[in-house]
Amino acid sequence: MSKAKIGVVGYGVIGQRLADGVAKQQDMELVGVADIAPTLAIRALAEKGMPYPLYAALPDKAQIFEKEGIPVSGTMDDLLQQVDMILDATSAGVGMKNKELYVKHGVKAIFQGGEKGGVAEVFFHGYANYEKGVGKDYLKLTSCNTTGLIRAVDCLDRAFGVERVVITIIRRVADPGDTHRGLVDVAQVDPVPSHQATDLMEIMPHVEATGLLVHVPTSHGHIISILATPKKAASKEQVLAEFSQHPRIRTVRIADGFNSNTSLFRYARDLGNLRGDMYEIALFEETVELSGNNIFFAINIPQEAVVIPETIDGIRASLRMQTEREAAVALTNKYLGLGLWKKTP
């Protein structure tokens, strides 16, 4: 069986990780990446010997790369003629413009969470609504916070049913390197409900959700506290057992030193993960408590890599590589190495 041919447009924070994620899938081929300028990420790609072919996203930009000694394999049109699907990781608004090219070339596409909802047929999450993406031409991923939030809520929903959730998000204000965002010594509050709560309801319409979002001056990870009302009673032990079995949820203990967003980032680096990435959300075991029938817990969201598994799921759904959720996520997990750590002592 031939491999699915995939291209990535926008080789930035998310695009780099999408390219790496696709390259790990044994049933997919990363044809190349496209960008418009010799950014630091592109310069690093060139210095590493161009492990991924580079295409100029705009025809007149090719000479800029060549001037910097960065080889290009063609233009975006050349890339689109070779792929089955594009993963668009461009800035918000650019994906909508790029879609015209994708439609022209008859190429399917997946857009990231920052793009407007009208760009796609389905707002997609690999675990919560995989079947809705099967065969669709254009999917849009949820944001990093929403992706991790839905993972956790869906895990409980499949085990116990969930009626409603109330969330509080402590959100990093900027990615590393975003020096133009200068919030210092401040916790900035957004109006309720946060878009993550409303987005969750779009993916999981049977769950009522509301939430608060607070921006804080950190750059690695978000912390989300969640109060979930289940449809049937569950013990703390049962809740922890469900989380512990999920391949994309890493259950950690504060007592072991996992007491912050930065401790998890450091651990990922100590594991040797490229860029200090972690695909899993982390569930802090000591935060799991019951309040009446309500389940309370807190999770960490590694914002730069958390959406990669669900994007890979989207490729599988859109291209009908697997029509059943269980088979699709199992393959994505296998190739990304998710859940393997659970088997270690």
Image (tube, grey):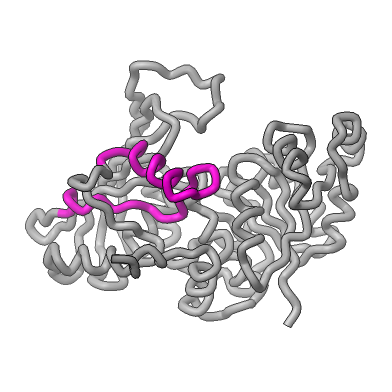
Question: On the picture, is 124 further left or further right than 247?
Answer: right
306 vs 323, nearest the viewer = 306
Instruction: Say above or below: 21 vs 158.
Output: above
Residue at the bottom extreme, as displayed: 1
In the displayed structure image, the side of residue 237 where residue 21 appears, left or right: right
Residue 180 in view here: yes
Q: Residue 322, position in %: x, y? A: 58, 79
Q: Which residue shows up at 49% across the image and 76% down it?
A: 325
Towards the viewer: 233 or 199 = 233
- Where in the figure is residue 175, as x and y percent of width and height? 51, 32
Quarter holding the C terminus is bottom left
Q: Judge by depth and name the residue closer to the eye, 258 or 36.
A: 258
Question: Seen in the image, is 34 located left or right of residue 167?
Answer: right
Residue 53 lies, in percent from the top left, at 80, 51
In magenta stretch: residue 272:
yes
Relative to 130, residue 199 above or below: above
Is residue 156 among the parts visible in the rendering? Answer: no
Please tell me which residue is depicted at 36% across the width and 44% down the height of the picture: 264
Magenta stretch contains residue 202: no
Q: Residue at x 46, y 54 (%)?
A: 279
Q: How many marks?
A: 0
**The magenta segment:** 259-288
Left or right placement of residue 13 versus residue 345 in this view? right
Where residue 243 appears, as percent x and y from the top left, is 28, 63
Residue 49 appears in which quarter of the rendering? top right
Which residue is found at the position 75% from the left and 52% from the top? 52
The quadrant of the image that shows the N terminus is bottom right
